Amino acid sequence: MADAAESGARTTGRAVWFEAVRTAVVKEEAVASPRSDQVTIQSIVSLISPGTEMQVYRGQISPDTDLGLETCAGSFGFPVKYAYQVVGRVVEVGKDVPLRAGELVFARHPHQDLFTMRYNPDLVFRLPPDMDPEVAVFANLADVALNALLDVPVRIGDVVTVFGQGIVGLFCTLFASKTAGHLIVVDPVAARRRRGAEFGAHRAVHPDQVAQAVSEATGGRGADVAIEVSGAPPALQQAIAVTGQEGVIVAVSYYGSRPVTLTLAPEFHFRRQRIVSSQVSSVGSGLQTRWSFSRRMETVLSLLSNAAARVMISHRLPLRAAPRAYELLDTNPDEALGVILQHRDA
């Protein structure tokens, strides 16, 4: 279509901003018509990330850290507009964008009911037209889990320990269960442990029980792989303690500005363990030439199921109630898990 920017049309959208620590507000802001390389999207739903996004909300990211996404705005020193998982429909496109009005898309963009952004296949991708938006909105967090298992594959028969059964932890459990010989999940919240068992764990335990559980499962040998995705720094120490000789600990959690103090002797040194960083913005392990972002997302979409995603949804709130949504995740971890913001509430 012709470059929409020629019309000069502008409108407004409602966006979620963090104005200070634990202070979320919904603000109106201008939305420009797309230039030749841009797309305008009308949001349907967005998902709050219980990990990094909540650290931003709590002020746990160093103010001088780069935002990492061109779609975000402000700074971690506040105010900041920061989030990255929206499902919506294309409203208008510039002449160089390979999308069409009406197509269902996933966008790495903050919570906003109408927005214009630069088209980039790493930031916006087309979804199957019949896919449920409430399922598709989990694609990014499922991709985090998939990337972790690309970085450190779970071999057939491996004993695996997953620390944390939030959304990413549950996806790690689901994916690891396909090959693990024995899968132990760890979480202090009983409801999350129950979900972990539903997603394929052979045993779900409180952090106080993990050492005994791994010892019993391995005859004292220790786990082959430990996946730390709880977001709690002490869990990384526990992962080291329960992992066996030449085992691997995958650090998926982003701890932000919180200090992480580890005791490395004797387990880490004498067992010749490896700690591997897994970060979703890139593929490691020498897979870059084969595993593009597009391939990862295609794989994620094939793995997402309606049943799994819907088990993770704990709350649905209108966009205008975003401040309440963050309060729920911050103060009620026993109840809040997948908190979806619905954008059709104007």
Image (spheres, rainbow, N blue to C red):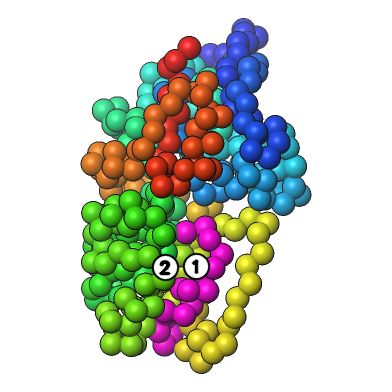
> Is 184 on the left or on the right of 288, as rendered?
left
Q: In which quarter of the image is residue 102?
A: top left
Label disc, if present, on residue 274 of the rendered structure: none
Q: Which residue is drawn at 43% across and 17% down?
A: 344
What percent of the width, then of the height, locates residue 201? 26, 63
Q: Is residue 260 visible?
A: yes
Looking at the image, residue 66 lies above or below residue 193: above
What percent of the width, then of the height, locates residue 75? 72, 40
Which sits earlier in the primary sequence, circle 1 or circle 2?
2
Badge 1 marks a residue whose secondary structure is helix
> Is 117 on the left or on the right of 311, as rendered?
right
Looking at the image, residue 194 lies above or below residue 32: below
Q: Is residue 38 visible?
A: no
What percent of the width, then of the height, locates residue 264? 58, 83
Q: Which amino acid does label 2 sit on?
A: Pro
The reply to whether the magenta stretch includes residue 301 is: no
How far apart marks 1 and 2 lie (CA) works out to 8 Å
Q: Do the residues labelled 1 and 2 touch (CB within 8 Å)?
A: yes
Label disc, if present, on residue 207 of the rendered structure: 2
Q: Residue at x 51, y 92 (%)?
A: 270
Q: Which residue is drawn at 60% across and 48% down?
A: 55
Q: How many marks?
A: 2
Badge 2 marks a residue whose secondary structure is helix
Q: Residue at x 63, y 67 (%)?
A: 260
How would you rate the neighbour count of disc 1 (Cα within 10 Å): few for under 14, some for 14-19, many for 20 or more?
Answer: many
User: Which dot, 1 or 2, sits closer to the camera?
Assistant: 2
The reply to whether the magenta stretch includes residue 237 is: yes
Write down the residue under mark 1: 235
> Is 206 on the left or on the right of 35, as rendered?
left
Q: Quadrant of residue 80?
A: top right
The range drawn in magenta is 230-247
- Between 73 and 6, the residue placed more toward the observer is 73
